[in-house]
Amino acid sequence: MDEARARDVLGAAGVLPGPAGDARLLALGENAVFAAGDLVVKVGRDAELLDRARRELDIAVWLAEAGVPAVRAAEPKASLVEGHPVTVWHRLPDSVRPAEPRDLAELLRLVHALPSPPFELPPRDLLGGVERWLRLAGDAIDPADAAYLRERRDGFVATAAALTPHLPPGPIHGDALPRNVHVGPDGPVLVDLETFAADLREHDLVVMALSRDRYGIPAAAYDSFTSAYGWDVREWPGCGVLRGARETASCAWVAQHAPSNPKALVEFERRVASLREGDETVRWYSF
C-alpha cells in the first residue's frame, strides 16, 4: 500500500471533516497514519489486520478505564473500507520534549500492575515473522545466513517456552521503546497499542537492555530506566534467552529490506556476523 492508495481509502472512509488530500501523512508502514485537525486516522495495509485493529481499540478503552495514560480512540469501532481497516483516534497535543527511558519505565510499571483485560490478548509472538521476512529477502541474502537464523529461531522458541519468569506474567506493551511514548503537556503517554500481548513481563524489559548493548543507548539512560522501573532484567537468568530471540527477529526484519536497499544488506550482514561470532559488543544501527 503506497500513500496514494492510502489517501484514496482515507477519502472513501469519510471520517475527516475536510478533504483527504489535506491530511498530513505521519507514517507509512503496516499502517498509513494521517493527521487532520484534532484527529489521527490509521489505514491498515490489508484486511488481515482488521482483527488487530479491533483489538487495539479494545485495548485503548481498557487502558482508559484503568487510568493508564495512552492514546484514546475517537471512534469505538474499526471499519473495513475497500479492503483496508480504518481506525480513528484523538490527536495528541504537540510533544514538549523527546521521550526518555525513564518515561517508558513509569508507564510500564502501570501496565505491568494491571490484571488481564476482559478480552483475550495474544501471546507475544516475537519470532512469528521470521519466516516471512526471510522469504521476502529471497536471494538477496546468503542462504546459509537464512538457514542459520531459522535454526536460531527454532532453538529460542523451545528455550523461551521453558523459562521461569521473575515477574508474574500478564499484559505487556510488546514493543517497549521510548519511540512509543509521547510526552505532552500532561506527561508521558503510551502510543502504538497494537503489539499489546499477554506474556512474560520480562519481554518489555529486555527491549531496553538490548538497546543499551546493541543500539547505543547510554548506560546512564538505561540506569534511569531500571531505577524508575525498580528492577534490572539483566539480573534474571532468562534474560539472555529473550535477548537472543529478539536479536534473531531483528536480523530477519532487516533482511526483508535487503533486495531493494544495499544499506539494509550491509546492516543484516553485520548483525548476522556478530551473532555467529557470539560478540555482544558489536554495535547495531536502527533501520
Image (cartoon, rainbow, N blue to C red):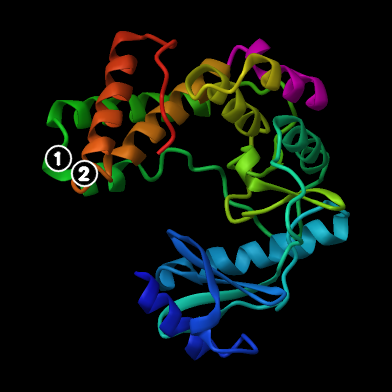
Q: In this rendering, would 255 be left or right of 242?
A: left
For the record, the magenta segment spans: 223-238
Q: Going 15% across and 26% down the picture, which residue do you hit?
A: 144
In what element is the residue under mark 1? helix
* Residue 225 on the magenta span: yes
Residue 81, above or below 100: below
Q: Where is residue 223 shown, x and y percent of the image?
A: 72, 17
Mark number displayed over residue 140: 1
Tell me if I can see residue 176 in this picture. yes
Q: Amino acid at mark 1?
A: Ala
Dominant SS of magenta comes to: helix
Q: For this view, does 195 lie left or right of residue 220?
A: left
- Mark 1, Cα crowd under 10 Å, few <14 / some 14-19 / many 20+, is some
In the displayed structure image, the side of residue 173 where residue 145 appears, left or right:
left
Which residue in the protein does label 2 denote?
137
Q: CA distance from mark 2 to mark 1?
A: 6 Å
Q: Residue at x 30, y 45 (%)?
A: 133
Residue 163 visible at all:
no
Q: Magenta includes 141?
A: no
Q: Amino acid at mark 2?
A: Ala
Looking at the image, which residue is at 83% across and 60% down?
Answer: 64
Number of numbered discs on residues? 2
Residue 42, percent across and down? 55, 70
Residue 114 position within the rendered picture, expressed as x and y whole percent measured from the top left: 82, 45
| Circle on res. 280 | none
As helix, strand or loop, the secondary structure at mark 2 comes to helix
Nearest to the observer: residue 175 or residue 215:
215
Q: Quadrant of the C terminus?
A: top left
* Whether label 2 touches label 1, CB < 8 Å: yes
Task: Give the quarter of the image for residue 177.
Answer: top right
